[in-house]
Image (spheres, helix red, strand yellow):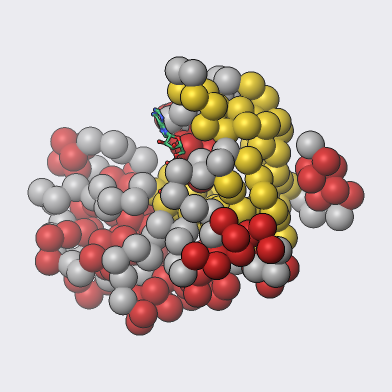
Amino acid sequence: MEQLMERMDTGVTPVLDIEDVSIQFGDFKAIKDVSTSIGKNEIRFFIGPNGAGKTTILDAICGKNKVSDGKIVFHGDSGDRDVTRMKEYAISDLGIGRKFQAPSVFGGITIDENMELAVARKHSIYSTTFLKLSKEKREYMNHILEFIGLKDKRFQYPSSLSHGEKQWLEIGMLMAARPKLMLLDEPVAGMGRRETEKTAEMLKNIKKECSIIVVEHDMQFAKDVSDTVTVFHEGTVLDEGTMETVQQNQQVIDVYLGRG
Ligand SMILES: Nc1ncnc2c1ncn2[C@@H]1O[C@H](COP(=O)(O)OP(=O)(O)OP(=O)(O)O)[C@@H](O)[C@H]1O
């Protein structure tokens, strides 16, 4: 809570406030009284050792995990909403988009058709038969395809894409819903350096329109892209600040950064 108050004092307009959140799985408390605030147009990284609770809290923001205590308040177009009791689809409709670690595009339809579904906000491949996008939506879809570098491959199937390209397609599909907050779980895992750099450029552009939370172990990527980082350890926040400042914290070095 103290951290939250400090950030409020800095004058940053928050898009999401996580307030004293705990998450319990049976007897095990995976998240203990975590508070943090994500600003508008901010790229926040959640970092920390395996099992620290990063994905657990990301899953709570999108409604996949139940919050045992505390609240998560999203400041969207329709005002301030506590999302902790809301269903996943309703949270997504509010403007929070979640990308999971493994790409989850539809393999049986083309890249173009995958994008059509995303722009039309349909969640079933059976919908493609009946889709007729407005001119404005098709233009926006073309813009995204260009942005993610897949315009020339639009009539191919996702199986023909490289691992990185599949990740970009999924990021593009998230963008299609024009979210205010994007949640990305290890977006560059398995990518080469060139693909990682391209993803970094993409995220820096996306943040002009929306805030992003990234769970990541690639510390070079975190240094290149993050505005701020939250360091998790055993379900609590160990430190928070710029990458430059947290990497000087001896506790952070001991539990995570110094472990190679
Ligand atoms: N559904 C669940 N049921 C029981 N325990 C869970 C569940 N989900 C996560 N946990 C536990 O909660 C803790 C935090 O897991 P989490 O996946 O959030 O860690 P993480 O920081 O994302 O780790 P990694 O970097 O390895 O992805 C771990 O001990 C994990 O085993």
Q: Residue furthest bottom?
A: 194
Task: Give the answer, above or below, for where 75 lies relative to 187.
Answer: above
Residue 241 in sight: yes
Q: Is residue 151 left or right of residue 178?
A: left
Give the camera-side residue of 204 and 234: 234
Task: Say which quadrant the N terminus sits in.
Answer: top right
Q: Residue at x 49, y 65 (%)?
A: 259
Residue 133 in sight: no
Task: Give the answer, above or below, for where 23 lies relative to 250.
Answer: above
Q: Residue at x 50, y 69 (%)?
A: 219
x and y percentages locating residue 230 in the rendered image: 63, 53
Q: Is residue 88 left or right of residue 106?
A: right
Give the camera-side residue of 127 and 16: 16
Give the camera-side residue of 240 and 130: 240
x and y percentages locating residue 84 in the rendered image: 58, 25
x and y percentages locating residue 134 in the rendered image: 36, 50
Task: Give the answer, above or below, for where 15 lies relative to 74.
Answer: below
Q: Residue at x 61, y 28 (%)?
A: 22
Task: Give the answer, above or below, for where 151 lies relative to 47.
Answer: below
Which quarter of the picture shows residue 197?
A: bottom left
Q: Residue at x 10, y 49 (%)?
A: 108
Q: Is residue 132 left or right of residue 107?
A: right
Ligand 1 visible in quadrant? top left
Report the label total.
0
x and y percentages locating residue 112 in the rendered image: 22, 58
Give the camera-side residue of 139 and 223: 223
